[in-house]
Image (spheres, rainbow, N blue to C red):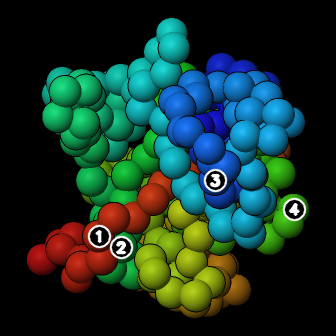
Amino acid sequence: RGQHGPGQPDFTPLLQVHRATWSGNAQVLDSVAKVNEAAQAGALRVEKTSIVVNYPFVKWPGGELPVDSKLEAALDGGPLVSAPDLSAKTITFKLHQCYPESYYIITDTGAVPMAAMMNVAGAPAAGSLVEVGATEKIYVFGNGIPGFAAMGFQPSVFASKAGETAWSPMWEHVTVMWNQGKTPVVLKTESEILAREKAGDVKLFPGTPDTGGQSFVVNCPAPITAPNTFGV
C-alpha cells in the first residue's frame, strides 16, 4: 500500500515496490505506519527493490476520477466512461489513439494547477521526472487538422511506440502549432515533426503556448498497441 494519494503535496502514481515477508503469523496491515511497526518489532522483514510500478489512482478518500457522460471530446467531463465498480473491481476508461500505433488513457498530471481543467488527478511529485530522464515527449497539435486529441486536432505523436525500450507512460507535453500560411498535413512521427520545424512549417512550444516555455508531465499509460485508424 502506498503512503500518499491525490491532493497531498508529494503524491505520485509511481511507486517503488518493497517485498514484505512475515516471520510468524500474518495479519492485515492497512497503513505504512503499521508496516513499519511490524518491521521494527521483528515480525516482518521488508526488502526494498528496484522495481517501480505505475499505479494511477481512480478512487481515494475524498475523491475519484470523474465520468464523461457525453464522450464527445478527449478531456471534457473526465477520463472515465463509467464510475468505478468496486464490487467487480473494474473500471472503464476513455481510450485515445496516438502515433505510432499506441492507444492510451489519461490519469494524472504533474501540472497540478492544470489538473482540474484536464479533469484528472494532480500528481505534484511527477513534475521532477523530466529532470531525471524518466519521460519521453508527446507532441500535441494545437491547430491544423481537426480530430479528437486533447486539443481538438489530429492524434498526438509519441517519440516511441508503447512497449519500446525508450518508451515511458510519463509524457513531457509539447504543443505543435502550424505557422500561418502553411498547409497542415497529418504528421505521424517525431522525425516528421522535427523536419517540419526545421523547415519553418511548425513551431514547438514546451507545455503549451501559454506556459511560457515550461513543460509538464502527463501520465498516459498505453494498454493497447494497434494500427492507427485516424483518417482511414
Q: Amino acid at mark 4?
A: Glu
Displayed quadrant of residue 54: bottom right
Of the image marks 3 and 1, the number of the one nearer the N terminus: 3
Residue occupying the point 69% across, 55% down: 18
Question: Dot 4 lies on which element?
Answer: loop
Q: Nearer the viewer, residue 70 or 231?
A: 70
Q: Identify the residue under disc 1.
A: 224
Nearer the camera: disc 3 or disc 2: 3
Of the image marks 4 and 3, the number of the one nearer the N terminus: 3
Give the image location of residue 166, x and y in percent.
62, 84
Q: Identify the residue under disc 4.
A: 131
Nearer the camera: disc 3 or disc 1: 3
Res 223 visible: yes
Q: Amino acid at mark 2?
A: Ser
Of the image marks 1 and 2, the number of the one nearer the N terminus: 2
CB contact under 8 Å: marks 1 and 2: yes
What whole-number distance in Å separates the C-alpha atoms at marks 3 and 1?
34 Å
Q: Amino acid at mark 1?
A: Ile
Q: Identify the residue under disc 3.
A: 21
Nearer the camera: disc 4 or disc 3: 3
Residue 190 lies, with reference to residue 34, above or below; the image says: below
**Crowding at mark 1 (Cα within 10 Å: few <14, some 14-19, many 20+):** some
Of the image marks 4 and 2, the number of the one nearer the N terminus: 2
Question: Dot 3 lies on which element?
Answer: strand
Q: Identify the residue under disc 2.
A: 102
Q: Is residue 195 left or right of residue 133?
A: left
**Crowding at mark 4 (Cα within 10 Å: few <14, some 14-19, many 20+):** few
What whole-number distance in Å separates the C-alpha atoms at marks 1 and 2?
6 Å
> Can you tell which mark lies on residue 215?
none
